């Protein structure tokens, strides 16, 4: 599903953010990407979302070498991955239903498909009864559920999560992690950057640790391994 081959990233100020990074993630895996602040985790996510380009190396996602994508192919590629952020990034003037619906409108889904799929996904994340609410009328955990619904509504094969529980209290964070785990169990590959030590330790998933742009650990049923 994901392969990074000898990937390096040097930012314009000559800062080496990634140095010869190699890893593979198989279809259906759940992988935590951990490491100290500034290690290069977000850089990897940005490369996968094609927000930035590697200085050298190749990145293959879903059998496509995304390093070679043409500019006009990038929006189409981005639609094949779902993304969840720490700060939810919902549209404040759209309801819960409309936020999720919007993601389907962008990919030009039919009215019929939208009417069928949006309630289905809202039910899956436990927000069917709040579909007419606006984001400011929801708790943080509920807002993140909407963001997750939006990320999976088009059935992406890969779900990228950038500190999805960073703004949530421990109980709510656990609930969000369980929801993402359920999504993974239904077949979606998950790559998650997180600093949530307790959750990583509890989940017993694969853990890839990165420090100063270098992979230092790749562990099945791993632990967080840092004290922060
Ligand atoms: N646009 C940029 N220009 C120059 N340097 C950058 C840029 N973006 C990131 N860096 C540097 O590259 C390194 C890796 O940054 P990155 O954001 O990938 O770290 P991170 O592991 O995600 O950290 P955090 O856990 O704090 O989010 C850091 O030293 C950072 O200062």
Image (cartoon, helix red, strand yellow):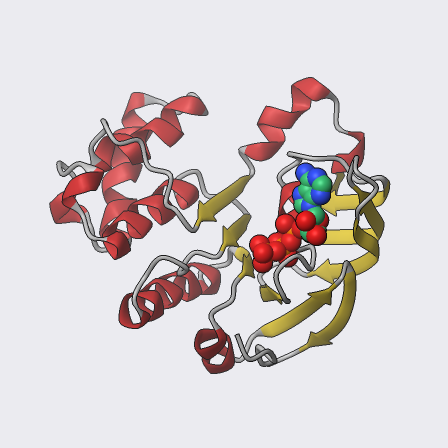
Residue furthest top as drawn: 72
Res. 47 visible in picture? no
Classify 182 as above or below 48.
Answer: below
Residue furthest front as drawn: 13
126 vs 199, left or right, is: left
- Residue 121, position as x, y percentages in the image: 30, 46
Q: How many marks?
A: 0
Residue visible at 77% across and 66% down in the picture: 215
Which sits in the foreground, 15 or 117?
A: 15
Classify 92 as above or below 188.
Answer: above
Classify 11 as above or below 200.
Answer: above
Residue visible at 29% across and 33% down in the picture: 99
- Residue 83, position as x, y percentages in the image: 49, 44
Which sits in the foreground, 107 or 43?
A: 43
Residue visible at 69% across and 55% down in the picture: 40
Residue visible at 51% across and 52% down in the picture: 162
- Residue 17, position as x, y percentages in the image: 76, 50
Res. 73 visible in picture? yes
Which sits in the foreground, 160 or 53?
A: 53
86 vs 205, left or right, is: left
- Residue 82, position as x, y percentages in the image: 49, 43
Say which quarter of the image contains residue 154.
Answer: top left
Say which quarter of the image contains residue 33.
Answer: bottom right
């Amino acid at each position: 599903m994901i392969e990074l081959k000898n990937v390096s990233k040097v930012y314009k100020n000559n800062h080496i953010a990634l140095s010869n990074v190699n890893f593979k993630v198989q279809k259906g895996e759940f992988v935590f990407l951990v490491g100290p602040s500034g290690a290069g985790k977000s850089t990897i996510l940005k490369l996968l979302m094609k927000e930035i380009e590697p200085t050298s190396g190749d990145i293959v996602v879903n059998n496509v070498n995304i390093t070679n994508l043409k500019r006009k192919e990038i929006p189409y590629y981005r639609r094949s991955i779902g993304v969840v952020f720490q700060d939810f990034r919902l549209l404040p003037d759209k309801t819960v239903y409309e936020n999720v619906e919007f993601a389907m409108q962008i990919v030009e889904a039919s009215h019929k498909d939208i009417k069928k799929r949006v309630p289905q996904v809202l039910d899956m994340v436990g927000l069917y009864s709040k579909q007419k609410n606006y984001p400011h009328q929801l708790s943080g955990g509920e807002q993140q559920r909407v963001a997750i619904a939006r990320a999976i509504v088009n059935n992406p094969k890969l779900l990228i999560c950038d500190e999805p529980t960073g703004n949530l209290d421990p109980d709510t964070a656990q609930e969000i992690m369980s929801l993402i785990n359920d999504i993974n169990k239904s077949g979606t590959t998950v790559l998650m950057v997180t600093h949530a030590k307790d959750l990583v330790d509890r989940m017993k998933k694969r853990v890839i640790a990165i420090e100063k742009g270098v992979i230092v650990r790749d562990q099945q049923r791993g632990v967080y391994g840092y004290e922060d």
